[in-house]
Image (cartoon, rainbow, N blue to C red):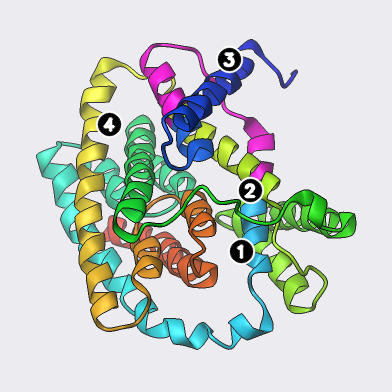
Amino acid sequence: MRYFTKARLATFAIAALGVAAFLLLHLPLPLLLGPMLGCLIAAFSGVNLQGPGKFGIFMRTFLGVAVGSSITPAILGELQSFAGSLMFVPLYITVIGALGYPLFRYAFGFNHATAWYSAMPGGLQDMLVFGEEAGGDVRALSLIHATRVLVVVTLAPLVMTAYWGVNLTRPPGVSASELAASQIALMVFAGFAGWQIAERLGMFGASILGPMILTAILSVTGVITHRPPAEIIWAAQFFIGIAVGVKYAGITLRELRIFVGAGAVYALVLALISLGFIEVIHLLQLAPPMDAFLAYLPGGQAEMVVIAILAGADLAFVVSHHLLRIVLVIMIGPLVERRLRR
C-alpha cells in the first residue's frame, strides 16, 4: 500500500495551513497546535483525513531521544530530590478516579467500563485496549481522551505565556548544521532501535520510553552529547499535532455532543484538580511552579514533553511524573475496574 494517499496528502496540507494560520496570528506552538486544530476543524467539516502512520510514530521517538539525552550523571544525582513531589502522584490518581468515574457513569450515563477508562489519566492506546477488553465503547474512549489532550495542550501554552511570560517561540535546540553528523546518526539509531526493542518487549509508550532509555544509557556513557536539533523537534511537533487532530475524523453530531462534550467538561475538571496539586507542590517548595505545572497536567506524554522542551523546563522532573502516573494507571487501573464491576 502506498504511503502518500490522497487522504494523507490532504491531511498534511490542512496541517500546513493550520501552521500558517497560527504563525500569521502569532499564536503559541504553531507547529503543534496549528496541525491539531486544523485537522480538528477539517474533521468537523467532514473531510476525509488520514494520520501519518508509522512515520509519525517514528518522529515521536525523537522526543524520547530528547528526554534521554538530558539525563546526565549530574541529573542522576538529583533524582532523589523529585521524591517529595512524586509521592503525591498516587493521591492525584486516586482523586481523579474518585471524581471522574461517577461523573462519566452517572452524570453522562456511560456504561461501567467506558466510564472507568474514560476517567483514568493513562496513555490513550493503553486505555483503549483495556477499555475494549472490559466491554467499553472504544469510539467514546478515543474521542474523550483525545479531547482531554486537546484541551489541556491548548490551554497550557496560553497559561504559561500569560502567567509566566514563557517564550515558546524560541528554537528547541541548536540547528542541525551545528551538530556533527555522527551525533545525528546516533540519535536516529537510538530512536529507531529503542522504539523497536521496546515494542517487541510489549512496553507501554514504546515509541517514547524505549528511545528514552537507550539514549539515556548513551548519554550517561558520553556517547550522545547533545539533544536532537531544533529542526527534528519542530518536525516531531507537526506529526504529533496531526495524530491528535485526525482522531476526530468521521465524527458525527451525536459524537460531538456526547463524547467530545463529556471530554471537554472532564478536561476542565482535571485542570482544576491538577491546579490544586500544583499549588500544594509549590507551597511545599518541592519544585519550581512551572515544572510542577507541566508535571501534573494530564496531557498526552508526547505533547507535554514538547511543551517542556520549548519552555526550557526540567525534562527529567516532568517526564518522571508522567511516567509514574501512566505506570500506576496501567498497573492498578484494571484491578480496580474489575473490583468495581463485581
Visible residue check, residue 342: no
What residue is shown at x 63% (from left), y 11% (from top)? 6
Camera-nearest residue between 60 and 98: 60
What residue is shown at x 72% (from left), y 22% (from top)? 3
Q: Is residue 196 left or right of residue 146?
A: right
Q: Residue 198, relative to residue 155: is it above or below?
A: below
What residue is shown at x 26% (from left), y 83% (from top)? 284
C-beta proximity under 8 Å, tags 3 and 1: no
First reached walking from the N terminus: tag 1 or tag 4: 1
Disc 2 marks which amino acid?
Answer: Ile
Q: Label 4, on which residue?
A: 260
Tell me which segment is drawn in magenta: 37-59
| Residue 35 drawn at (x, y percent) | 50, 30
Q: Label 1, on which residue?
A: 67
Which disc number belongs to residue 10? 3
| Mark 3 vs mark 4, CA separation in Å | 24 Å
Q: Which mark lies nearer to you, 4 or 2?
A: 2
First reached walking from the N terminus: tag 2 or tag 3: 3
Visible residue check, residue 159: yes
Q: Which mark lies nearer to you, 2 or 3?
A: 2
Task: Say whether residue 50 is magenta.
Answer: yes
| Mark 4 vs mark 2, CA separation in Å | 29 Å
Secondary structure type for disc 3 = helix
| Mark 2 vs mark 3, CA separation in Å | 23 Å
Q: Residues within 10 Å of mark 3 (few under 14, many from 20)?
A: some
Task: Say whether residue 65 is magenta.
Answer: no
Disc 1 marks which amino acid?
Answer: Val
Q: Which mark lies nearer to you, 1 or 4?
A: 1
Q: Label 2, on which residue?
A: 233
| Residue 39 drawn at (x, y percent) | 46, 24
